[in-house]
Amino acid sequence: MVQPRKTPKQARAKQRVADILTAAETLLANEGYDNFSTNRVAKDADINIASLYQYFPNKESLVYAINRKMLDEVIEGCQRYESLMPNMGWQQLFDVMDNELITDTHHVKLVRALDYAIYTNEDLMAMELEHEQRIAAFYAKAFSFYGSKWPESSLLNSGRLIYKMNNISYYDLGHLNERDLEESMKLYKQHLYSLIERIISQPKP
């Protein structure tokens, strides 16, 4: 079973689940999936393991809940970025997005750990595909808003490509030293913005 066992209804129970997820998210981000366990989460949340098992039967269900929470936050973030479009050029919007993602160290570490965990479970993989589709749809909407005449299918495929590029650049380059990481990010941004400009201003190839 990967989904949480039950949904809390009372305020006290909701707070308990929130505390469990906060502890679980911090542990997963800081120590990775291999060192992640229900016993560690219960200890960090200052509850007994039986209370944790009322809601989360195993560590996979905790990861599922963390990933679900992140996906919901991504959807909220996309909605917020969409609201900025009328008052920003596309480059300004992407600068805002890049700066918010890159400077959030906790987010970067958490995504790295989740990416590792996702490939261990079909339900988590299905959620990742949902995540990818939602991000691709956001990019497609942004490109269309800023003037792209490409067909919807091409915009969605472009969005998926950029999502994969983001994952590599933001989350998979943590092993580099600071100088190489900075240079890699500059090169990535140059190529990304060149691609976006082409999508927005040129006919479909």
Image (cartoon, rainbow, N blue to C red):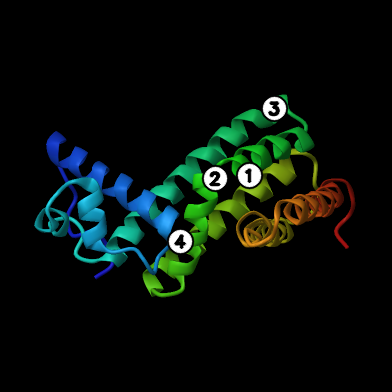
Q: Residue at x 46, y 73 (%)?
A: 119
Please identify the quadrant where the C terminus is shown.
bottom right
State the image coordinates of residue 76 (x, y, percent, origin top left).
48, 39
Q: Nearer the viewer, mark 4 or mark 3?
A: 4
Q: Which residue is mark 2?
A: 105
State the image coordinates of residue 201 (x, y, percent, origin top left).
88, 46
Q: Secondary structure at mark 2?
A: helix
Q: CA distance from mark 1 to mark 4?
A: 17 Å
Q: Which residue is mark 3?
A: 86
State the image coordinates of residue 108 (x, y, percent, origin top left).
55, 51
Q: CA distance from mark 1 to mark 2?
A: 7 Å
Q: Which residue is mark 4?
A: 114
Q: CA distance from mark 4 to mark 2?
A: 14 Å
Q: Residue at x 32, y 55 (%)?
A: 65
Mark number displayed over residue 102: 1
Q: Residue at x 16, y 45 (%)?
A: 8
Q: Secondary structure at mark 1?
A: helix
Q: CA distance from mark 3 to mark 1?
A: 24 Å
Answer whether labels 4 and 2 touch (C-beta < 8 Å): no
Q: Residue at x 64, y 62 (%)?
A: 175
- Crowding around mark 4 (Cα neighbors within 10 Å: few <14, some 14 to 19, many 20+) is many
- Crowding around mark 3 (Cα neighbors within 10 Å: few <14, some 14 to 19, many 20+) is few
State the image coordinates of residue 180 (x, y, percent, origin top left).
77, 56
Amino acid type at image mark 3: Pro
